[in-house]
Amino acid sequence: MANNKMLIKFFIASESIFFVMLILAYINFHGSNVEGPNAVNSLNPLRTGIFSLFLLASSLSVWLAGRSLVTKNHFMMKIWILVTIILGAVFIYGQASEWLGLIAQNITISRNVFGSTFFTLTGFHGFHVCVGLLMLSILLGLAMFGDFKGPKSDGVECVSIYWHFVDGVWIVVYSVIYLWAFL
């Protein structure tokens, strides 16, 4: 168990470096004189904030899944994993609809520096959410067809650690892209 947790923490540390670099790139270019669309005239922080609440709530549900495993309540563990998947999927839906709205306004990754840094950073995060949803779906499948004793129980904890990382990163990304722009 300790090895699996250590490996996921090393993986998260390496991914953190990518996120820090992308966030710094966004911050660096945010201050430059950008022609065309920018965060203030293109984004809706309230709407995205509402979808963000679903992702943040999923941190609680994945924690409850882990607690249910500890208390050997496998039925509730399955329910909480499913709830986490649904909450994460709602967040991804919100991000996808935002992207489609921006693209419909001709705000794309190739339009200007804002578009390229915005789509790269939010896309990188969205990819990580999708990977987390895949891992959660695999966990749910395993839970439906077996027990979670021994090494299998590590999976819930490792996926939970990863999911909390994805949620924590979003707090920073949302703050930088959606809140800082309006200060």
Image (cartoon, grey):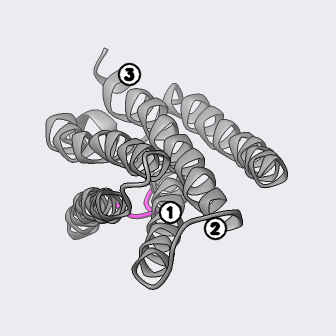
Q: Earlier in the sequence, mark 3 or mark 1?
A: 1
Callout 2: SS: helix
Relative to 68, is 40 above or below?
A: above
**How far from the left and from the top, in percent, is residue 121?**
52, 50
Query: Is 14 on the left-hand or right-hand side of 101?
Result: right
Q: Which region of the structure is painted magenta?
A: 107-111
Rounded to the nearest angstrom, the CA distance separating label 3 from label 1 is 27 Å
Rounded to the nearest angstrom, the CA distance separating label 2 from label 1 is 17 Å
Q: Nearer the viewer, mark 2 or mark 1?
A: 2
Residue at image x 42%, y 73%? 140
Kindly tell me whether residue 37 is visible in this rendering: no
Mark linked to residue 29: none
Residue at image x 59%, y 45%? 161
**How far from the left and from the top, in percent, is residue 42?**
24, 45
Dominant secondary structure of the residues highlighted in magenta in the image: loop
- The kind of residue on which mark 3 rests is Trp
- The kind of residue on which mark 2 rests is Lys
Q: Where, by quadrant of the figure, is residue 60 drawn? A: top left
Kindly tell me whether residue 39 is visible in this rendering: yes
Circle 1 is placed at which residue position?
132
Q: Nearer the viewer, residue 64 or 173?
A: 64
Relative to 130, is 178 above or below?
A: above
Query: Is 54 on the left-hand or right-hand side of 56?
Result: left
- The kind of residue on which mark 1 rests is Gly
Mark linked to residue 152: 2
Circle 3 is placed at which residue position?
180
The C terminus, quarter of image: top left
**How far from the left and from the top, in percent, is residue 34?**
45, 38
Q: Nearer the viewer, residue 25 or 63?
A: 63
Q: Nearer the viewer, mark 2 or mark 3?
A: 2
Query: Is 42 on the left-hand or right-hand side of 122?
Result: left
**How far from the left and from the top, in percent, is residue 48?**
22, 44
